[in-house]
Amino acid sequence: MAGTADRFDPTDLVALGVGLDAVELEMQQRARDFVEAHVLDELATWYADEMLPRELARALGAAGLLGLDVPGYGPEVGPVAVGLVMLELEAADSGVRSLASVHSSLAMHAVSRFASEEEQARWLPGMSSGDVLGCFALTEPDAGSDPRSMRTRARRSGSDWVLDGEKRWVTNGGIADVAVVWAVADEQIRGFLVPLDARGAEVRPINGRLSLRASVSSELALDGCRIPAGHALPGAVGLRAALTCLDEARYGIAWGAMGAARTCFAAALDHALARRQFGKQLAAFQLTQAKLATMAVELEKGLLLAHHLGLSKRAGRLRPEQVSVGKVGNVRAALEIARIARTVLGAEGITLGRAVMRHMTNLEAVLTYEGTEEVHLLAIGRALTGLDAFA
């Protein structure tokens, strides 16, 4: 975003940047500088090798980009600044944003909101610095959009808890130190902190992914995994607790998707201006300009929506269905921008160096994780009609 009224930025067509305050602009620039220094040169290798280095979390912590909205353990810069950081991280790659988002918005948020003061003091300082990396284990092989059907169980054994079950699609799992695990205990869904070096906890990689390759996705098998009683999250009782965490991350996705879209649009614009066909710049053709204008309009609409949600969140008025509007609407828009951008680049659009196809495949996964498109549409439909269509 431009941040000044007198300098035109084609990726900020309606000059949203002029409405940002100094802290928000500083945090956005900090994230942009981080990506430039720590991510861009290595990203193609990470994507090709289907990995993300553990050291990236410590670098994020050292840059002050973790736990941004965790009281007492982050800078508490406000939701718009948090969103701008997510935008810049996903402008590089959805996997990079996912690492930070899952760690901060899911794991740190769960510990901050639901853990005892003793457990908060134990985990949050290291999580804030990135020395301790968290993950979030809710989804199971047979329980994705229907978490109430989860089979993972927790039972009391003396003063401890014992967990049995299997979780899947655990982002950060293979490089994390602690997992926020959701299990059925005493006929209720509850949250637990499970150190991943605990006996009975086994993390296995999920390889062969065609999306989110610059990321670590894992299975977590729990077989008689014993944890101390204090590792149960006393405030995390009921599915609503887990969904509260997910709403934090989904808010970040509404911003992050626009980062991916911005990169795709910028790549298409640069290519159209540089490429010559039939004796003139590709950008001089009417159909190409129509594509560029369509992408720009959709990008600005998404940025304005994300910014509005941030203002609502700052005022304490953001509702779950509004988060769903941001998540499903902006990911849809970002996918369309990526697809149009690919057509502008032609064959160059499918190469790894151009980033567009990488973002496109990433966004296909973003569309369905942390709530599928269908789940978010039903959440919006319930708000509109007062009728629950989930059952």
Image (cartoon, rainbow, N blue to C red):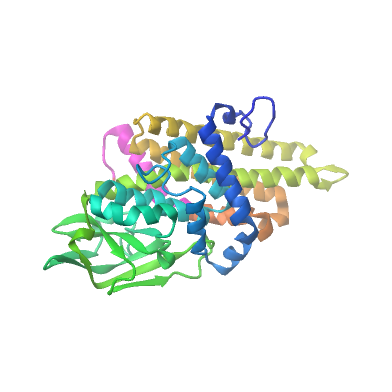
The front one of 49 and 388 is 49
The region drawn magenta spans 366-389
Determine the residue positioned at 74% across, 47% down. 271
The front one of 110 and 205 is 110
Furthest toward the right, the residue is 279
Q: Is residue 368 left or right of residue 41?
A: left
Q: Is residue 15 left or right of residue 186?
A: right
Determine the residue positioned at 77% across, 40% down. 283
Instruction: Look at the image and tell me whether residue 313 can be seen.
Output: yes
Instruction: Look at the image and tell me whether residue 102 can be seen.
Output: no
Determine the residue positioned at 75% across, 36% down. 286
**In this figure, what is the number of numbered marks?**
0
Instruction: Please tell me in which quadrant of the rendered image residue 281 appears.
Output: top right
Furthest toward the left, the residue is 158
Q: Is residue 387 magenta?
A: yes
The front one of 259 and 180 is 180
Instruction: Please tell me in which quadrant of the rendered image residue 20 appears.
Output: top right
The front one of 41 and 367 is 41
List x then y, in percent, for residue 349: 68, 54
Determine the residue positioned at 44% across, 34% down. 310
Quadrant in which the N terminus appears: top right
Q: Is residue 11 magenta?
A: no
List x then y, in percent, for residue 295: 62, 39
List x then y, in percent, for residue 187: 14, 57
List x then y, in percent, for residue 72: 35, 43
